[in-house]
């Protein structure tokens, strides 16, 4: 019986999870957790906060065609333990820290279940621009990945609430581990290293071998300068490529975004014979700001994005759009329907290309500048 259970775990370790679709070009991923809208109050409501609970977004009408939410960020490791920062959603009123020095976020635990009930894939992102370099050795990078799995992945005692995520190896079934999200289980991990991190490939490889979906958030210039050999040696499921804060930003003049995405697509499709992608079915998401607060010059209205999407939507590995982040996208002063307008552009591309839909219908500071 034990052998059967182990084989089932192994068989499920790399299966497609939740609502992310590896065969669709209209996946929509939204980062949540860093309140990049910076808590600006509405004039008629001084208590208004731009970043609400995760479950509020997952169940909103605007998120009807959003199929992935990415909780951000684990911003470092202290004594080997991942350090979680969720800005205003994990202040002293919402989260607790006990003698283990690990944050517990009961509202997020509840909301992960809410999001999964709404048909969403939920990932946890490691990194961001305030991530502290852990100075890993190969062994400590492996240990860090196992710690992430033990604290956020499934164990023999967790209540999965619909998650199909599985974990194998030493981290699976771990006991006596403080879990920030309690019994809730994320569907996988996103890696967003903004600076080169030693043994990032070992960290990613351990996650790939033992647990769920795996994504990364490289910059749009190809090749990415920060992820190192991780992208060329580890099989990622999809990439949330940041087409902002760079010259190849989707909003900047000179039409540099489409050529940059074509370079990524050549790599993804295996045409780069020097360092080809380990997964030629990897999906590439066009990462854009959800508003102008974080990256004013790189914000593009959905109409402008539609032009870029029209140029890249037919690429073999194009997979959809990533939005940074929920707090901006849902309170966008220039477009109150930003998320819906973006997803409608993708639906049009999917219809034109014949791609199957990926519809999802079927105490830190109060705000943070951290971004993918």
Image: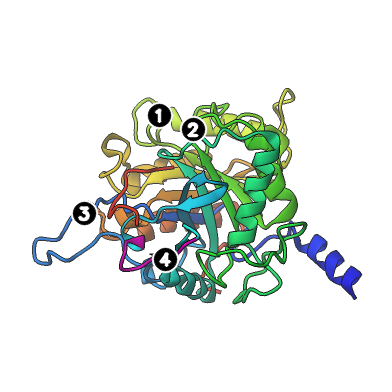
| Residue with the most extreme top position | 274
Which residue occupies 38% across, 66% down?
95
- Marks 1 and 4 sit apart, C-alpha to C-alpha, by 27 Å
How far across and down, in percent of the image, does residue 43 sit?
Answer: 9, 61
Secondary structure of residue under mark 4: helix
- Percent x, y for residue 242? 46, 38
Is 190 on the left-hand or right-hand side of 173?
left
Where in the figure is residue 104, as x and y percent of width and height? 45, 65
Query: Which mark is first along the chain, 4 or 3?
Result: 4
User: Which is nearer the N-term, disc 3 or disc 1?
Assistant: 1
Instruction: Tell me whether the residue at label 3 lies in contact with that at label 4, contact meaning CB atoms closer than 8 angstroms.
Output: no
User: Which residues fall within the magenta stretch?
Assistant: 90-99
Above or below, 119 against 290 in this view is below
The residue tagged with tag 3: helix, strand or loop? loop
Q: Which residue is mark 1?
A: 246
Residue matched to label 3:
333
SS at circle 2: loop
Q: Does residue 209 appear left or right of residue 327 in this picture?
A: right
Is residue 168 visible to us here? yes
Q: Residue furthest left?
A: 44
Residues at badges 1 and 4 in contact (C-beta under 8 Å)? no
Few, some or many residues within 10 Å of mark 1 (<14, 14–19, 20+): some
Q: In whole angstroms, how far apart are the C-alphas of marks 3 and 2?
A: 26 Å
Instruction: Check disc 2 and report the residue beneath it.
Output: 220
């Amino acid at each position: 019986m034990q052998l059967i259970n182990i084989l089932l775990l192994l068989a499920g370790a790399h299966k497609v999870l939740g609502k992310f679709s590896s065969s669709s070009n209209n996946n929509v991923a939204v980062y949540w957790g860093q309140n990049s809208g910076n808590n600006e109050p509405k004039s008629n409501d001084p208590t208004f906060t731009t970043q609400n609970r995760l479950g509020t977004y997952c169940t909103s009408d605007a998120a009807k065609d959003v199929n992935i939410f990415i909780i951000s960020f684990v911003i470092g490791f202290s004594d080997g333990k991942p350090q979680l920062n969720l800005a205003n959603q994990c202040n002293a009123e919402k989260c607790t820290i006990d003698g283990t020095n690990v944050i517990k976020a009961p509202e997020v635990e509840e909301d992960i279940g809410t999001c999964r009930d709404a048909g969403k894939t939920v990932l946890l992102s490691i990194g961001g621009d305030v991530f502290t370099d852990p100075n890993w050795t190969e062994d400590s990078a492996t240990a860090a990945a196992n710690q992430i799995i033990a604290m956020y992945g499934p164990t023999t005692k967790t209540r999965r609430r619909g998650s199909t995520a599985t974990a194998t190896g030493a981290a699976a079934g771990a006991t006596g581990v403080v879990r920030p999200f309690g019994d809730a289980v994320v569907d996988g991990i996103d890696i967003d290293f903004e600076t080169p991190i030693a043994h990032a490939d070992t960290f990613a490889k351990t996650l790939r071998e033992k647990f769920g979906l795996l994504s990364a958030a490289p910059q749009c210039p190809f090749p990415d300068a920060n992820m190192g050999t991780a992208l060329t040696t580890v099989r990622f499921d999809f990439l949330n490529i940041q087409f902002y804060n760079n010259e190849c930003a989707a909003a900047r003049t000179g039409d540099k975004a489409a050529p940059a995405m074509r370079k990524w697509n050549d790599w993804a499709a295996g045409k780069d014979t020097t360092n080809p992608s380990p997964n030629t079915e990897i999906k590439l998401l066009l990462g854009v700001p959800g508003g102008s607060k974080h990256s004013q010059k790189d914000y593009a209205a959905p109409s402008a994005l539609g032009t870029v999407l029209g140029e890249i939507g037919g690429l073999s590995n194009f997979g959809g759009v990533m939005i940074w982040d929920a707090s901006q996208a849902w309170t966008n002063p220039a477009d109150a329907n930003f998320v819906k307008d973006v997803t409608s552009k993708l639906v049009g591309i999917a219809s034109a290309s014949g791609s199957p839909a990926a519809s999802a219908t079927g105490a830190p500071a109060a705000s943070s500048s951290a971004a993918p």
